[in-house]
Amino acid sequence: MPYRKDQFANSEIYHIISRGVNGMTLFNDEDDYYRMIFSIYELNNSLPTTIRDRREERNRFKKQNRSQSSEIFWIDKRDNFLEILSFCFMPNHFHLLVRQLKDGGITKFMSKVGTGYAGYFNRRYKRKGYVFQNRFKSMHVENDDYIKTLFTYIHANPISLLESNWKELGIKDPKKAIDFLENNYRWSSYQDFIGKTNFPSVTKRNFLYELMGGENGCKSAVKDWIAYKNTLLNAQENLQRTGLWELL
């Protein structure tokens, strides 16, 4: 994931999208997804470190405090590049909604994550070469309405694994789509936002909770989006059934 010259401003929010090179699948199984989850957490750190170092540090902590009170907690010593507000991993790409904390934080973070995951991926699958497209895409998020839309869009992305054309044609089975997002698709931050502990340490959720209206507001936003898409589908089907679709 090569270096970018983009100027990202501290305290500003950005939507980041990164794709596999030539549409290549980035995540083939749970191990790959877990590795990326671990990467975006552990490598969100300006201090010199490796995932191996952090694992060993955690294991030492657990071993040393095995007999101690449950009130003994792991202390997070990371110096974060950014806040991860939400995320979603799809088979051949991933979305991040982030707030930059340090100068150059987004660029440095994406470089560390890209290099680390590409190394893991190439070792595991005995391959060489690029894993990600040359540049990740970034969009500055300038207002609350845009953030709300992105929250819904990012977390609704996995519906395409059930209905590939839902973004264009609507959703045929809204109940199945909602159940899939809430109970079955683990590789996003959505379950944590609706009160189902999944990967709670990865995201900072207070800002979006306040903006969206808490857990219920997060749920409602996604459900309303799905209902809207279903309404569009029903309207199209009615037009086709009456023969009016061809006149449009």
Image (cartoon, helix red, strand yellow):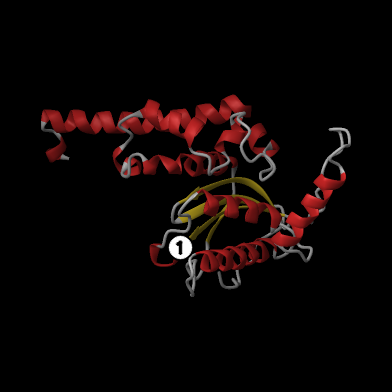
Point out residue 20 in the picture as x, y percentages from the top left corner. Answer: 45, 62
Q: Amino acid at mark 1?
A: Gly
Res 12 visible: no
* Label 1: few (<14), some (14–19) or many (≥20) C-alpha neighbours in 10 Å: some
Q: Residue at x 46, y 39 (%)?
A: 156
Can you tell which quarter of the image residue 116 is in? bottom right
Can you tell which quarter of the image residue 56 is in? bottom right
Left or right of 178 on screen, residue 167: left
Quadrant of the drawing holding the N terminus: bottom right
Point out residue 89 in the picture as x, y percentages from the top left corner. Answer: 51, 49
Quadrant of the drawing holding the C terminus: top left
Extreme residue toward the bottom, this view: 129
SS at badge 1: loop
Count of numbered labels shown in the rendering:
1
User: Does residue 71 sit above or below 130 in this rendering?
Assistant: above
Left or right of 105 on screen, residue 157: left
Q: Nearer the viewer, residue 21 or 247?
A: 21
Q: Residue at x 35, y 42 (%)?
A: 167
Extreme residue toward the left, this view: 243
Q: Nearer the viewer, residue 105 or 1?
A: 1
Can you tell which quarter of the image residue 177 is in? top left
Q: Residue at x 48, y 51 (%)?
A: 29
Point out residue 198 in the picture as x, y percentages from the top left corner. Answer: 61, 37
User: Does residue 138 sit above or below 144 in this rendering?
Assistant: below
Q: Nearer the viewer, residue 185 or 1?
A: 185
Q: Nearer the viewer, residue 53 or 244?
A: 53
Res 154 visible: yes
- Which residue is under mark 1? 20
Point out residue 137 in the picture as x, y percentages from the top left corner. Answer: 51, 61
